[in-house]
Amino acid sequence: MPAGDTVDRPATAQVWAWLAELPDPEIPVISLTDLGIVRDVAWQGDTLVVTVTPTYSGCPATGIISLDIERALRERGIGKLRIDRQLSPPWTSDWLGPEAREKLRAFGIAPPVPGSAATPGAARARSLADGLSVACPRCGSDRTERLSQFGSTPCKAAWRCRDCLEPFDYFKCI
């Protein structure tokens, strides 16, 4: 048992495992931990503190995510719980690991192009308009085109493959 953990409270590793079971409300194929928004889990005295960074400050799913975390942990006997929102440093799509990217692709959502999240906002918008190469999640072709910067949720854009002709969502780089 890690130092500081007692029989009365679960180890933080167990809490991380529970959080890994919670799906993102907008993209249920990946968990909150896959998404990388759960920043920290720590005991402060007898209170469990879960620190979350939303994908962006206006994310409409932030409230639901907090409720889902609270419900799941209370169902497992966590009595004293605090969910902190941490905005700095801001979340970036670079926090999605290889497994999360593959889950998105298998679900039919093109994952963010690695490294493109590091581009500043205005330059990033230009790079998208100037021909960012996004592979089709269905057939793998890079002959794709952006239809709209706005997709099925605020964190996705609408794209189409010119080879298989299928439309798909692209998880925007933030």
Image (cartoon, rainbow, N blue to C red):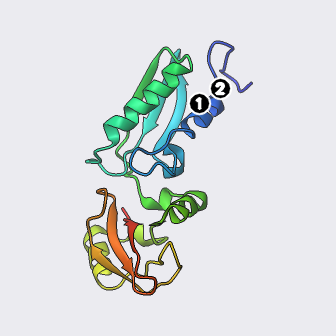
The three-letter amino acid code for the residue at tag 1 is: Val
| Residue placed furthest toward the right | 1
Please give left or right for residue 33 compared with residue 150 in the image: right
User: Marks 2 and 1, how far apart in space?
Assistant: 7 Å
Disc 2 marks a residue whose amino acid type is Ala
Report if the CB atoms under discs 2 and 1 are less than 8 Å apart.
yes
Question: Which residue lies under the disc numbered 2?
Answer: 11
Crowding around mark 2 (Cα neighbors within 10 Å: few <14, some 14 to 19, many 20+) is: some
Image position, residue 133 (x, y; %):
43, 82
Rendered-image quadrant of the N terminus:
top right
Say which quadrant the C terminus sits in: bottom left
Q: Mark 2 falls on what kind of element?
A: loop
Residue to which mark 1 is pinned:
15
- 144 sits to left or right of 41: left
| Residue found at x 59% / y 30% | 15
Measured from the top left, where is residue 155 in percent x and y?
Answer: 33, 58
User: 54 above or below 11?
Assistant: below
Q: For mark 1, does the 10 Å Cα neighbourhood hold few (<14), some (14 to 19), or many (20 or more) residues?
A: some
Q: Please say if 108 is above or below 132.
A: above
